Image (cartoon, rainbow, N blue to C red):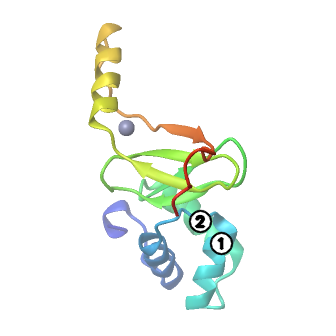
Amino acid sequence: MCRSKGLRITGPRRIIISVISEMADYPDIVELHRRIQAVNRRISLSTVYRNLRQLVEAGMVIRHTFEHGRSRYELAGRLHHDHLVDHKTGKLIEFHSPELETLLDNLAAQHGYKVVGHRLQVYVEASTAADPQD
Ligand SMILES: [Zn+2]
């Protein structure tokens, strides 16, 4: 995929992509760097920054920005999903709702448009009535 995007496959880039593809919890760059260093200690934070920027520009990685906190990263090309964001802990919960997608399609159609893409972040906090699942 790197090749088709015109990006050279360097050692650090390979490690960064493999670490991102294995993580399910959308770490920020500091945590990402920590995990990358567990694979190769010599990869610096600035190398991770530079490579992430290039991967985002090439459309291979999605950068999520939230109301507070650092940006977090996800490999592109996965099945469409939206996110609940626990605004206290920053925890991300993926969801996919066909009803919601239909609602958005209808909403756009009412205004003479069709949806070509969206990214939804719903800020939530654990309800006191229910035990928050982990
Ligand atoms: Zn959606």
Please tell me which residue is depicted at 41% across the width and 59% down the height of the picture.
60
Please tell me which residue is depicted at 35% across the width and 16% down the height of the picture.
107
| Residue 58 sits in quarter | bottom left
Q: 26 and 47: which one is in front? A: 26
Reading the image, the residue beneath label 2 is: 27
10 Å crowding of disc 1: few (<14), some (14-19), many (20+): few
Q: Are marks 1 and 2 in contact (CB under 8 Å)?
A: yes
Task: Determine the quadrant in which ligand 1 lies.
Answer: top left
Residue 63 position, x and y percent, is: 54, 52
Mark 1 element type: helix
Q: Quadrant of the N terminus?
A: bottom left
Q: 116 and 98: which one is in front? A: 98
Residue 43 position, x and y percent, is: 64, 84
- In the picture, measured across the screen, residue 77 lies left or right of residue 125, that is left
Q: Is residue 128 above or below residue 12?
A: above
Q: Is residue 16 above or below residue 103?
A: below
Determine if the C-beta at disc 2 is less than 8 A from ligand 1: no
Residue 21 position, x and y percent, is: 42, 71
Q: Amino acid at mark 2?
A: Pro
- In the picture, measured across the screen, residue 96 lies left or right of residue 32, that is left
Q: Amino acid at mark 1?
A: Glu
Marks 1 and 2, Cα distance to the nearest angstrom? 6 Å
Reading the image, the residue beneath label 1 is: 31
10 Å crowding of disc 2: few (<14), some (14-19), many (20+): many
Residue 114 position, x and y percent, is: 29, 21
Mark 2 element type: loop
Q: Which mark is residue 58?
A: none
- In the picture, measured across the screen, residue 14 lies left or right of residue 71, that is left
Q: Residue furthest top?
A: 111
Q: 52 and 92: which one is in front? A: 92
Please tell me which residue is depicted at 54% across the width and 38% down the height of the picture.
122
Please tell me which residue is depicted at 65% across the width and 72% down the height of the picture.
31
